[in-house]
Amino acid sequence: MVRAPDNVVLNRAAAEALCREFVGWQCRLRQLAAREDGGRPSCGMRPRVTTRDGAELSPGIVTLIVESEPENSTQLFRYQYSRTQDPNERYDSMLETLQGSYFQEPSRFSDLITALFGSGSKLAARLLSDAHCVLDFEQYTQGYRIPCAVARLGAGHAFYQATLELGVGPQVTSFTMSDFSRTFSPDSTAGTDHAWGSHHLIAGGAVAGGDFYGKFPTQVLSGPDDATDEGRWIPTTSLDQYGATLAQWFGVQPADLPSIFPNLPNFPNPTLNFIGTGAQIRKARA
């Protein structure tokens, strides 16, 4: 495949005008996402990442734009964060700021694009090694293809601090949920029947990740963990415990958990230490 040539703007004034146009477009997209979609990043905020030669490194990463002088906003977000321990109230407070005047003046924003990566990210390592990449932004009928220099921001850098405050990683948790699993052995129609003992994934800044919780079953038909000789594994962790742990992180008081999860009193440990305060203690001990 022949790679399309870059559009090159030779005139400095024209290049600066195009840059301001892009920043203004990003401000509009981000304000719209805050007002209409709870702040969830739209496709125009998740550019495709390629090399200069057009090889795809990632189908999309979440990016942030930062003010040229972000110190005041960073202090504001920190203040809003410290006012309450309720993650929902923290989220709503910051979202209200982003819905209002924060993105109203594109001229306050720099042309620096930031992103957060995990400590073991292979993509981040590749980008730092190459020291450059191309970001392809597209939403609705508008798009921009931006060659970028890549650098790591120091922990004390104002842009790094602003990215952390806007990223609110510890306030976002993704998890899977299902009330049943499937049998290990297929049925007469080559399908599978309802079963127990499924596995779930949890990810987020507040999660003590990289580990299994509960006992992994012996996946042998008629084995010690098979309840019906069809691969219905007997679970070792209750869905009530799993849900109660997440609910408590969301702000439900421990005394209210049994009314939401009526089977919870049947288990010696009502919650699991994979998220929240218990997870942080577990991380520290590790």
Image (cartoon, rainbow, N blue to C red):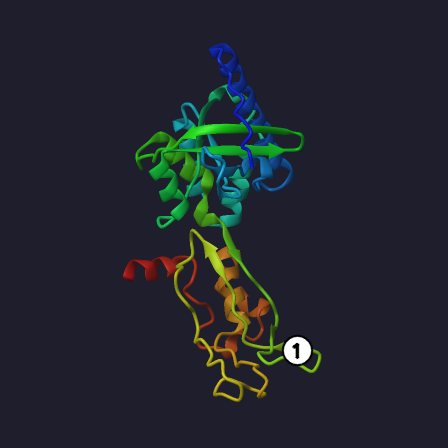
Q: Nearer the viewer, residue 83 or 124?
A: 124
User: Which residue is most to the right?
Assistant: 189
Quadrant for residue 32, please give it.
top right
Instruction: Decide: is 100 above or below 241.
Output: above
Q: Quadrant of the N terminus?
A: top right
Instruction: Decide: is 46 above or below 17.
Output: below
Instruction: Decide: is 244 above or below 47.
Output: below
User: Which residue is most to the front?
Assistant: 1
Q: Amino acid at mark 1?
A: Asp
User: How far across and down, in percent of the image, does residue 53 sit?
Assistant: 47, 34
Q: Nearer the viewer, residue 200 or 75?
A: 200
Quadrant for residue 7, please give it.
top right
Is any atom of residue 197 visible in this view? yes
User: How far across and down, in percent of the image, does residue 104 sit?
Assistant: 56, 24
Q: Is residue 168 left or right of residue 42?
A: left
Marker count (numbered): 1
Q: Secondary structure at mark 1?
A: loop
- The residue at the point 36 percent across, 57 percent down is 280
- The residue at the point 42 percent across, 62 percent down is 274
Is any atom of residue 79 visible in this view? no
User: How far across and down, in percent of the image, does residue 250 sit?
Assistant: 52, 55
**Within-10-Å neighbours for mark 1: few <14, some 14–19, many 20+:** some
Q: Which residue is mark 1?
A: 193
- The residue at the point 55 percent across, 42 percent down is 92
Q: Nearer the viewer, residue 275 or 127?
A: 127
Instruction: Decide: is 101 above or below 269.
Output: above
Q: Quadrant of the C terminus?
A: bottom left
User: How far across and down, in percent of the image, does residue 183 sit?
Assistant: 60, 78
